[in-house]
Amino acid sequence: MVIEDDAFIGSRSMVVESARVRRGAKLGAGVILSKSTRVFDAETGDELPRGEAPAWSVCVSSTRVKKFPGGEFGMPCLLVLKRLPEGSDHDKLALNDILRDHGIAS
């Protein structure tokens, strides 16, 4: 695992298996990030590189529905809620506001 400078890892989060938290990324509480975790941009729906929290972003755990022969199931993923200006300091109140704006309790 690699956690770059200025990153923030929320409580009860796990970063394992060569996953990468890029510079300035903020992970919400309880995020589980592994090398194989799918990552999606909430604004565009684009899939980003697996196992990587993008630089200067706010990320939370989520699920993405996937169809299997036995039915549809929610598969874990990392959701990028917002991109931050490069060099942003960690501000817990600002992070809480971003999570609230998206209906996520901090």
Image (cartoon, rainbow, N blue to C red):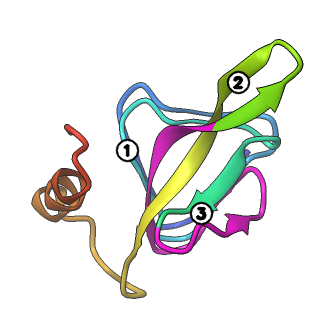
The percent position of residue 40, horizontal first and vertical second, equals: 62, 59
Rounded to the nearest whole Å, what is the CA distance between mark 1 and mark 3?
16 Å
Q: Which mark is residue 28?
A: 1
Q: Nearer the viewer, mark 1 or mark 3?
A: 1
User: Do tag 1 and tag 3 residues touch (Cβ < 8 Å)?
Assistant: no
- Tag 2 residue: 72
The percent position of residue 10, horizontal first and vertical second, equals: 37, 40
The percent position of residue 41, horizontal first and vertical second, equals: 56, 66
46 in magenta: yes
* Residue 6 visible at all: no
- The residue carrying pointer 2 sits among few (fewer than 14), some (14 to 19) or many (20 or more) residues within 10 Å by Cα, namely few
Q: Is residue 45 left or right of residue 84?
A: right
Q: Which mark is residue 4?
A: 3
Q: Nearer the viewer, mark 1 or mark 2?
A: 2
Quadrant containing the N terminus in the rendered view: top right
Secondary structure type for disc 1:
loop
Residue 26's place in the image compared with 11, above or below, is below
